[in-house]
Every structure is written in C-alpha cells, then in structure tokens.
Image (tube, coloured by chain):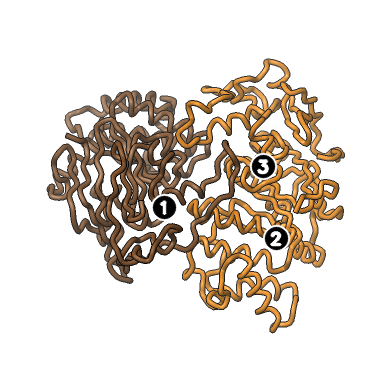
Chain colours: A brown, B orange
Amino acid sequence: MPLLEVDNISIGYHTRRGYLKAVEGVSFVLEEGQSLGLVGESGCGKTTIGMALMGLLPPNGSVSKGRILLEGKNILTMSDEEKRRIRWRKMAMIFQAAMNALNPVQRVGNQIAEAILVHYPSLEKEAALAQVEGLFDLVGIPRERITDYPHQYSGGMRQRAVIAMALSCRPKMIIADEPTTALDVIVQDQILEEVKALQREFHIGIIFISHDISIVADMCHQIGVMYAGQLVEFGPWRAVFETPAHPYTKALLASFPTLTGKKSDLMPIPGETPNLTRPPVGCRFHDRCPAAQAFCRTTLPQWVDMDSGHRALCCRC
Amino acid sequence: MMADATRPILQLRNVSKIYKSKGSLFRGSSRDVVALNRLSLDIHKGEIFGLVGESGSGKTTAGRLVVSLEETTYGRIFLDSREVTGLKGGALKAFRRKIQMIFQDPYQSLNPQRSIYDTVSEPLKIHRMGKPSERKDRVRDALKSVGLSPPDDFLFRYPHQLSGGQRQRVAIARAMVLNPEFVIADEPTSMLDASISAQIFNILLAMRKNFGVTQMFITHSLAAARYLCDRIAVIYRGNLMEIGPAEEVIRNPMHPYTQALIDAVPKFGHSKDARRYGTLLARNHEVREDSGCIFYPRCAVAEADPCPRKQPGLTGVGPGHLVACFRQGSAEIIASPLADIAVEGI
C-alpha cells in the first residue's frame, strides 16, 4: 500500500471575484521513503495541495472532489480529532520562510519540546528537551543554542530548527513547501544535503514543493509538473528532465539559466497564466503553447502514458 | 555590440561603506559594520557587468552608492572620468539623468496611487525634458521597448492591475525613458518566476543591443550572471574575491569562495558528478582578531600563514582575470582606508 495516494483531487477558493478553481483533478502516489517534487510557477496550485494534505486550507478554501488516502485512510473524511492526531505525528510540514513557523517570543527549544509534549503527553518536559537536543544534533544546530530565541538564529539555523520541529514526532511523511527559497545558495545546499540524509536514515516520504526545478531534480525520485491547477506531467525525475514530453515542461526547462553545458538562449514563455475563476474549456496551456493546434482550445487533453510511470497530459504528445 | 575595453564608463576606487554602531567613539571599532571594504573596479562602456554575492555581501550597498542613494564613507566614484562622489544639488540631478536603477521588488517600487503613464513620465517631468505632448510619445516608446504593447493599453492602468513581471517591465521603462548611459539592476528577477525572469533578462540584453546602455547586474545567481554578463565580480562580506570574464570565472574559478558557490549551485540532477572543489569547512576556523582574509574562517584550503593575519590584494591569474587570494600569489594589502591608492586598469 502506498504511503500517500492523492486521488483526483479538486480544490477551490471562494473569492470576491468568483470561485477560483485552484486545483483540478490531480492524482499521484507517494511510496514510503520516496520523495516527490511538485514543481510549477506561481498560481499553479502546488502550495494549495500541500495545505490540503495538512488540513490547513484557509476558511474560504475546500476540497470539492476526490480523496486523499494516508496509509489507506481518507483524511478528508476524518474528524478534527483524528486530523489533529495525524498532523505532526504521521505528517509534518516545513513552510516557506521559517520565520512564519517559529514563535518569536518563545525560546526555540521550548517550542519544539511543546510540539512533542502535545503528541506524547505522558512525557516529562526534561525528557522532551532531551529529545530536542538529539534533534539539534541531527540537523546540525549546536546544543547550546537550545535556549535562544528565533531572532538570535541565522536564517539557515531557523530553517534547521523548523526541520527539527517537523522531525520531532517521527512522522512518516514531510511536506516541504519552498523550504530553502529564502536562503543563500551555500546554506541551501547544506540544508538540502541534510534533508536527503535524514530521509534516507529515517525512511521518510517527502513531498517537495518548489518553483525551482534545479533543486527538485537533485532531491526527488519522482517529479510532478503543475500548470494552472493541473498536473501536466509526472514521472521519474530523469525521464521528466531528460525527455520531457509536455510542451510546458519543455518550456519551463528552457527558461532556467544553467551554470554548465552549452550556453543557449533562454526561451521565456510568452503570455500569462489563465484566470482560474474562468478556466479555459480545453487545454489550459493552449494559448502559450508552441505546439498548439486549433482543437487544443476546446478539447480536454488526455493522459498519455510513456514508459516506466512517465505520463503527460497533452493531446499532441 | 561589443564592450569598449578602452573606455571605462564607471570607476570605483577604494569605495568603502561603514555603518557605525551607536555610541562608538573610535573609528574601526569592532562593532562597526563594514558593508563594503575598499571596492575598486572599472566598468566598460556597453558591457553588462555582474556583481555576484550572497546576502550580506555588500552588493546592494555597492549599487546604492553608485547611484548616490547613500554616501560613501571612504573612496571615490567616477562616471565618464568625472568624479561623482558626494554630489549634491544641481550636479546630482544632472548625474541622475545619466544613471538609473531598477529595484528588486516590483510590488514596492511603483507608487500604487500613480498610473503607469504618471510613473514612467515622472523622470521626464522632474528633468523638464520634452513638451507635455512629446512626453506621451516617449512613454509609449519606453513601454514598447519593454514589450508592453500596445502601450495605450497600459498607460492608464494602475500597478495593482498588473502582474509582477509587467510591473518590473514598467520599472525598466521608467529607468530607460531618460535614455541613461548606465543602469543598475538590483536583483530584478529574484521575486519573479523563471519564465518571467527569462523575459526580463532578454529585455536587458535588448536594451544593450538597441540603446548601448551599460549595465551593472546585481545578483545572487551565478547562472543568471553567466547568461547575462560579460564580466563578473564575486563579492563576499564587503570584499572583492574574484573578477574576470563571466564564462572564465565560472569555468575556472580561482578563489575558494567562488569555488564553494559553484559547488553549491544545484545541478539539475547531476550534483554528484559535478562536485569538484570542496573548499568550504564544515566547522569554521577560530578567529581571534579582525585581521586576515575575510574568507579565512570558512576556508578549507587556507594556509596557516599568512591567511589568518593578512588581507590579500588582487593578483592576475589570466587575461582580465584577477583574484584576492594568497594561494594564487596575492600580495598583502597595507590597510589604510584613508589612502587613495590608485589601481590601474582593473
């Protein structure tokens, strides 16, 4: 049984400008100990999926269709109490910009100890703090910093503290939403290496959400490319990167400057993403697609299967 | 259009910026923050020059000093061979016609209460350029040159009606409407998606091609610098580490910090094959004083002498390629921030 199965999920937000279909018909599977990268640009729906997985959608957002199965059980039909129990213990989240996750007026060690005590109430505070020390060793924060406040930490250290908090209840799965975007490249590299090592050691499933495909390629076994609320390509990272099938994936790869290899022209993608309060009838990428035909505007694209789990949502593949 | 190597359009000589901590009676007290330490470089007419560094490197400070948004603490800046350090009043205003800046955050750099027309025409009004009837045409031209076409669609919109990428184009149009000689772009794409960033990069390249504008591109991304820039300078904690042709510095980095940056850049799935240099320490060296190479505490290839005690000057390692590193043969800098050391032909 896979660790996580997202089955035909649609999510929308009620906004003043209408009902925004942020995610439409997304399905994928995450096995234990594997990592999946959800890649896409602003507004593609990747963060919305992360929020829905953790049950943290804002009040105006809701899952309109589909199931989310964690170890076989649909978390969308769970009671609040059940959701509270799985949050942090089965599934933890690392947010973008750790500043949002740490309480500025509480010492870091105490915050993490508190998270542990909420889920293991029979523990003594000293035992919880001892666990925090062990976590700090794991993520590379010197133990003596346990009594500091978040503002005394550097950006990289704060992110490590957030990772320690995510690991504190030994989850089976972590959702990391742009965990290194606010960090410098050298710190980012160190943190990503540590996350990879922790994943291997504790056999944790990771969903890695990012707009930066270069990181995702380094981190993830599988990649899902999202555009305008839909999954448009999915498969093993090498297949998606080296033989991309969907025109958007190809265009996205061609818009990143690289450090190595032949220096070629960057190909920006002309136009803008569609308005998701009134999504297009047919393919959502048709108006920006270099390979589009007339029928793409009105025909819903179908999934095309290539080998070894590599698939793309496109009429032209 | 090739850069004219014989005509430096911008020259920095020992430019330093020190932020003093409150209540400090002595210059150089250890609580002062040295944001920029004796930065000297030339930028040639028509080139796109990259200033690459992480946060705290001083790269944004350097940009702000060049456009006179802040004053230098020491050092001198020359534009077209005329000194522009500490300009005030009318001379500063004339200077501002020649040199413009594009900022990082397109959501903060445009006045939300002004229409696009008002924003882009404002420099023309301030410098009293053109008759009001001509200004509309100049604004239209500027908008067209950044790909906001047809321009009349945009003239009377407001920033909140535009996407981040469109706002950044407006910021570029505003910078270009005066036909400046020199534009500084401070991380113009770090808040934009990759495909939109690519649009902006191509606009900056077109600006050089069509208008001959010299540019300083401030960035944390070596890959972006490689794409856009003719030459790059790598800066760390206020100090110049390495400078040279972009392709050369990236393919053949000589400074351990540049090498560490290159190691750290994600490599699209090929990190294991590509990691080469390993110049970063896992645990920093202890430092007892503030002297010594600024990179010494993190340097895995540092030598016991003189790296912890002396600061390296720039030394040549290839055509146009310089590095500040004792291991490459740098001589020691005799520290004296007030000395006006003439540095030839960087």
Report in which chain the residue with disc 3 lies. Answer: B
User: Residue visible at 29% across and 36% down?
Assistant: A308
Q: Report which residue position mark 1 lands on.
A: A247
- In this view, the residue farthest toward the bottom is B133
Q: Amino acid at mark 2?
A: Gln
Left or right: A258 as drawn, with respect to A146:
right
Left or right: A43 as drawn, with respect to A49:
right
On screen, A104 above or below B256?
Answer: below
The percent position of residue B85, horizontal first and vertical second, equals 80, 53
For marks 3 and 2 on the same chain, the one whose residue lies earlier in the sequence: 3
| Picture disc at residue B100 | 2
Q: Report which residue position mark 3 lands on.
A: B35
Q: Amino acid at mark 3?
A: Ala
Report in which chain the residue with disc 1 lies. Answer: A
On screen, B303 above or below A116?
Answer: above
Residue B23 in sight here? no
Q: Amino acid at mark 1?
A: Pro
Q: Nearer the viewer, mark 3 or mark 1?
A: 1
The percent position of residue A3, horizontal first and vertical second, equals 21, 36
Give the position of the C terminus of chain B as an image quadrant: top right
